[in-house]
Each structure stands twice: as C-alpha cells, then as structure tokens.
Image (tube, coloured by chain):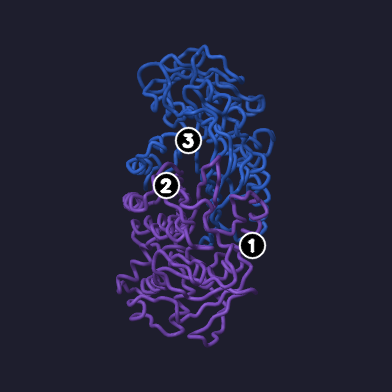
Chain colours: A purple, B blue
Amino acid sequence: MTTEPAFIDLLRTIATDPAARGLDDDAAVLTIGKQALVLTKDMLVEGIHFLPDDPPADIAWKLVAVNASDLAAKGATPLACLTGHSLSRDAGWDAAFAEGLKTALDHHGLALIGGDTVSVPAGQARVLSLTAIGLPSVPVPPSRAGVLAGDGLFVTGTIGDGWAGLSLLQAGKTEPASLVTAYRRPQARLADGPLLAQVTRAMMDVSDGLLIDAARMARASGLAVRIDLAQVPLSPDFVATIGSDQAATLAAATGGDDYQLLFAADAEAHLPIPAARIGGFAEGQGLTLSWNGMPVETPEKLGWQHG
Amino acid sequence: MTTEPAFIDLLRTIATDPAARGLDDDAAVLTIGKQALVLTKDMLVEGIHFLPDDPPADIAWKLVAVNASDLAAKGATPLACLTGHSLSRDAGWDAAFAEGLKTALDHHGLALIGGDTVSVPAGQARVLSLTAIGLPSVPVPPSRAGVLAGDGLFVTGTIGDGWAGLSLLQAGKTEPASLVTAYRRPQARLADGPLLAQVTRAMMDVSDGLLIDAARMARASGLAVRIDLAQVPLSPDFVATIGSDQAATLAAATGGDDYQLLFAADAEAHLPIPAARIGGFAEGQGLTLSWNGMPVETPEKLGWQHG
C-alpha cells in the first residue's frame, strides 16, 4: 500500500518546475509570458470524500467548491475549469449531477471549457475530478511558506461544522441543518481570498484538518507553530450539538472539510475581513497546543491523510 | 445507464463559453489577455483503457501520450500538466508508475506542476487522469469544424496498429512487438501537429476510431465525408498479422487507439509532412465508404464510445 505522502514524495522528484511550488501548496502558479495563472486539481471519490447517498447536486457543489477554495487560498479569482466524470449506472444520477454542476459553476464564476467522460467497470465507486484555473490578485500568490517568526496564525469563519455534519449524517441525523449544509455545500471564501492575499505572509485552505494544515504551513516555512485551542472559532450549532470543551474543539480542529482560509500575517496587521487569531509562529519546528494557555498534548492524528 | 454522448449533451448546455468550443473538440482554447492556451484532460480507467497487467510505466506513458496527442491535434506544443492519481494497494506499482511518468513527461516536454492523489475503496479499478496545457502555434488552433466542400481528408502514419496490439495481448500474444508497442506506447505527433496546423482547415487525433472520428469532423463542419478504405495506410506488421483486405482494413479503421492526426486540407495543398489522402468532403451529411471506388456498406459501429 502506498500512502499519499509517499507517492507525493515520488512525484516531487519529477515536479521540479518552479510552477509546481514543490507540490507543497494548494495550487500551482504558472507564468506564461507576463500572465500568471493559478491551477488546481482535486478529485472526489465515492465512499472516501462523499457518501453514496449524498444528493448528486451536493456532490457537484462540493467538487466545484473544494477546487474554488484552493484558488481562493492563493488569492485567485476563479476563471475556467475542466471536468473528469465517471459515468453512472443511473442516468438520473448523472442528470441531477449535471444540473447541480451548472448551479455550482455559476455560483463560483467558473466557465466549463472541457474535460473527459469515461465509463468504469460495474460496481465501481464514482471518481470525479475538476481542474480549475484562476487569475491571481497579487503578483506572487501566497504559498504555505514565507511565514516569519512572530507572525500570528489566523483563520476565517468557524471550524468543525463540516466534520460535525458528516458525523450527524453517519448517525442517520439531518439536524442541525447548518452543519449538514456545511458538509454538503461548503462555502469557498471566494471574495476573502483575494482581499487577504494583500496582507498575508502565507495562506492555505483548511481541507484535511486545522491542526495538520497548520503544521504543514509551519513545516513549509521552517518554523514552529502554537495554537490555543480555546481560540478556535466554533459555530453556535456546533457548540449546541458537539460542545465547546477541549475534546469537542480538538475534534473540530482535526476533522477537516472546513474550507476556511488559514493564514499567517504580522500579528499587528490590519486585516481586511474578520478572522480569529488562534496562535502564532516561532523559531523551531513542530506543533504545540494549549487550552487557554495550559499545555495540551498533541494528538497522534492531526487530520485526514489518504492511504 | 448514461451514455457518453448523452452526458456530454448535458454538459454542453453548461459549457457556453467560447473556450469550450461546444465540447466538440479535442481540447479547449482559452484566451487570457493576449495569451492563448490549449487545455485538455483525458482519463484512463483500468479494465477500460488499459489492461490490469499492462506494465505501469506503459500506462503512465499512455496517460501522457493521449493528452499530448490532443495538444498536437490543435497544433499546440506541450507545456505543463496536473495529474490525478488513485493510490494502489501495491506500492511497487505506484513507484513503477511514477518512474514511467517521469520518462513520459520528459519525452513529451510536459512539466508536472500539480494534481491530486486519492485513496479509493478496496478492489476499485485504478482511475488515472491528466490535465495538459499547451501553447498554440497559430492564432486560431484548428478545430473539427471549418472544413470546406471539396477538401481532402488526410491521415498521418498508419492506422490499426494500436487495436491490433490490444487484440494480440488479449489473445495472450506479444508479437509482433511493433503492434504491442503501438498499443502500449502510442507516439503522439508532437512535431507534426504544429507544422500541419499551418495548412489544415480542421484537425483532430484518431483516438476512438478513424471512421467515427472522421464522421465527427464532417458533422462539426456540416458536410458529408467519404473514405476509400483501400487508401487507409496500414503498417507492414499489421498487414502480415491481420491482413490488408477490406475486413482487416475496416477493423483498423474502427479499432481506435491510433493517435495519428486526421485533418482536412485543400486537396491541392502542399503538406509539410507526408500523409495519406484517404477521402474527401462534399455538401451533405453522413459517412460514405468505398473500396477502390466500389461502395462499401457503413458498419453499425464506427468506433469506441463509452457507456
């Protein structure tokens, strides 16, 4: 069995072009003449990234949103995309997916310009993909590296809602609706990304989990990061359903599927949008957790990894 | 069950941007400012596009070659790509694939700049994809439309070798090696595409079958096309193994997996590279076949379609 990090290590030896950013970022930044482009490609696999009985229009939304979120994390505005689709045994499913895809693409400002449609062996899980192209808002889109010791760590919105929504669905529940919607229809921070790119030293979206993603930013920047879990923003419905104690917050911070923007900026920077300061960076390496200043042991599993 | 054409019809209602070319072409042509880009995305599915015991390095080659062939068909030069990979249960397979990918990308001049790696449920067939970006050699890359009545229909190289190679492998044979290699390591016409784009009225690569692809070019151009099967170029090994009579030629012309360039040009045009003139276009619609001028009934199956 190959793990995702092991395979990416193999690809990294191939991806030596500067546009690849060492395969260490949410997206590639390709410069052609004077035109810079941000490119990302995310896949969704049935049974891994979505549940077999999730509504097809919601899956289409998620496919578009997770790619648009990668663009937003680089401060880019969505432009166009190519889709990869494995045909269903169920024509109604594909039709509902296509209708949902149109809604999602319109919402995210992505023009569908191409792609591929394939049949797959009977009984195969659906494999869906999108390649999205965006236009950057700053000359050098923020990467995961470039953080300075002393910078603050910030995050937009609230954390844990998508994970809570998935947990509810897995338990056969559909309320509170806000949590289920957060899982099925994540909202990429399309407008916030370009604004934040003006002031951030590094930025990424939270897809695999706040802790693992923060640790990746710290590693890419060659620094240590500390997070005070009590500062992690939780939604009212999350608090009412899961709680707001240390265990609930740890679940939120390792659950993933947030699609909030996680960024580093000067601790005193004036931010163009509201964001929670949840920690900061220092010389050294690794991730340190606290709860209102009291040390908390770092869990073994910081988030989601394939393989 | 959704068929590929039915699903593409659904997507066509979404893909209204001119860059999509009505989803009726091998690739998208996206213009940003003054920079035109050619973009294509092709998927390979285990058990559909390749055999489970095909060598992983050959599958990597094919993944790159089929995408590069789409770029060549638009007269574009390969630039960069993003990969989509479903992790294997077999780490050795993934390592061999990655090594083959490097060889193939180097050969085709494609820089790997990003992508996504996912795990899939146990027992799942591998689903591999590539999104490739190229730079066009002419201001308006040739599409499948634009043919004029009276134009000749031309094709590069020889037809049927890939199909013959697959047939040999399915029968447990590995000789003649040239045919097996044509199936496993197709040669995209990278240098020929940009040269031909200077003189073609329409161009595409032959992936699903010469007849179905020629019929698509005719339909996109609103014309009828006739092909004299006796003019379809066959390789010496194909002739020695499969034959050169009408049935053998029909098999070659409907087998697909050729990755030769099929193009329309003025019947008197001076071509920059050798190519066989296999037919021509006229007012009307549909595909008409002949064998040395004698009418041949058009077969029901003109090539490969998913679903």
Dot 3 alpha-carbon crowd within 10 angstroms: few under 14, some 14 to 19, many 20 or more: few
Where does label 3 land, which residue? Answer: B34
Residue A93 visible, this orientation = no
Secondary structure under tag 1 reads helix
Query: Vertical placement of A116 versus A22: above or below?
Result: above
Q: Residue at x 64, y 62 (%)?
A: A6
Query: Vertical placement of A212 versus A230: above or below?
Result: above
Q: Could you give the CA–CA distance between mark 1 and mark 2, rounded to whole angstroms?
A: 32 Å
Instruction: Locate residue A111: give its quadrant.
Output: top left
Q: Which mark is residue A6?
A: 1
Image mark count: 3
- Taking depth in this image into account, of A212 and A152 the one nearest to the observer is A152
Amino acid carrying mark 1 in the image: Ala
Q: Which residue ends up furthest to the bottom in the rendered image?
A: A294
Q: Chain of mark 1?
A: A
- Taking depth in this image into account, of B239 and A263 the one nearest to the observer is A263
Secondary structure under tag 2 reads strand
Do pointers 2 and 3 mark residues of a single chain?
Answer: no
Where does label 2 land, which residue? Answer: A79
- Evaluate if marks 2 and 3 touch, with contact meaning CB atoms under 8 Å apart: no
Secondary structure under tag 3 reads loop
Amino acid carrying mark 2 in the image: Leu
- Evaluate if marks 3 and 1 touch, with contact meaning CB atoms under 8 Å apart: no
Dot 1 alpha-carbon crowd within 10 angstroms: few under 14, some 14 to 19, many 20 or more: some
Amino acid carrying mark 3 in the image: Lys
- Across and down, in percent, residue A157 comes to 39, 69
- Evaluate if marks 1 and 2 touch, with contact meaning CB atoms under 8 Å apart: no
User: Which of pointers 1 and 2 indicates the residue nearer the eye?
Assistant: 2
Do pointers 3 and 1 mark residues of a single chain?
Answer: no
Q: Residue at x 60, y 61 (%)?
A: B89
Dot 2 alpha-carbon crowd within 10 angstroms: few under 14, some 14 to 19, many 20 or more: some
